[in-house]
Amino acid sequence: MILPVVFHPDYTVPLPPGHRFPIGKFGRIKDVLLEDGVIPPESLVEPPPASREWLTLAHHGFYVDAVLTLALDRRAIRRLGLPLSDALVRRGRAAVGGTVLTGRLALEHGLACNTAGGSHHAFAGHGAGFCLFNDVAVAIQVLRSEGLIERALVVDLDVHQGDGTAAIFQDEPEVFTFSLHCEANYPPAKETSDLDIGVPPGTGDDVYHSVLATHLPALLSDHRPDIVFYNAGVDPHVEDKLGRLALGDGGLARRDRYVIETCREAGVPVACVVGGGYADDLDRLARRHTSVHRAAALVAASADGRARVRVAGGRA
């Protein structure tokens, strides 16, 4: 299969000079994937922007309306950490639409990736931590409302706890939230996911992978999700400005391949979003983010190979 990869030009919009959110990485992720031949141009799919109706499936109407009309107060904007503008709203709606489309494509093909998404600090009634809308939460609710899925598993491996996602789904037994994060990191006050594992600063590749491998197979077999939304944040990397963990490039690649392969071997579609990652060198950061797309492309190619072997065997 050709791996579907979702991208929208509005993923990158202007921010004030010196702003610490590296928003330029999203366009560069797409460029690196094409330049390195990870995907062909025909893999790219552009999403429609999220509608107000979609957004209110996971967010309170008053918050959605305040964002769409640029009416957030100063306190809300300060908590968000981004200057509110028409361009930022377009970006937020595009990113949510991208994750909805990624979910649809994953259900169709078994595997799909966004080049943005993972805004897990957005709550039902407010944004936070550079997250305007919770794209994964909206996508799950859209797919559920359309009868495409009943149960979902969120595997959140961003270095920061997925507090907004946990809060949105706290009373939703059909949606299981799993967050593996650095315990001594943002947010200072954690929410309660269905499974939270906080590892100490400095945790490296082997311990991290052992923790992940201890829990993921059981979550798939016990919860029996119709889809997994995988937040592949690269801020656990040892060089990340906001991370505090110590995964290397190989550790991230191993993590991403393991999550995708484990889910696919269990027969569960996987929708991947990029999550957090912070560095001054946007090219280096974007390349780091493509770890999940490279892993997905390898898994997709392996699935093609196995299918060809089965067909050839049947003809023999």
Image (spheres, grey):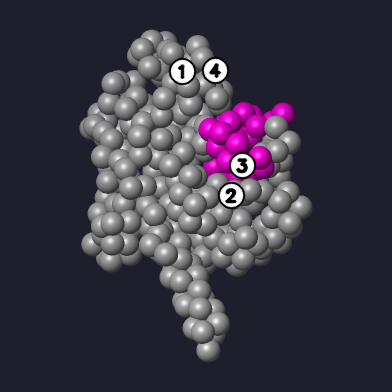
Of residues 257 and 109, which is closer to you in this image? 109
Q: Quadrant of residue 42?
A: bottom left
Residue at 36 percent of width and 12 percent of height: 69
Most distant residue in the right direction: 222
Dot in front, 1 or 3 = 3
Residue at 45 percent of width and 46 percent of height: 102
Image location (x, y in percent) of residue 142:
53, 33
Of residues 70 and 310, which is closer to you in this image? 310
Q: Which mark is residue 64?
A: 1
Q: Quadrant of residue 82?
A: top left
Looking at the image, do the residues carrying marks 3 and 4 touch, with CB atoms under 8 Å apart? no
Q: Which residue is mark 4?
A: 60
| Residue 106 to residue 184: above or below | below
| Residue 140 to residue 28: above or below | above
Residue at 51 percent of width and 78 percent of height: 311
* Magenta highlight on residue 58: no
Q: Disc 2 to disc 4, how far (Cα)? A: 24 Å
Q: Disc 4 to disc 1, how far (Cα)? A: 6 Å
Residue at 32 percent of width and 43 percent of height: 46
Dot 1 amino acid type: Val
Task: Specify the segment rendered in magenta.
Answer: 142-171
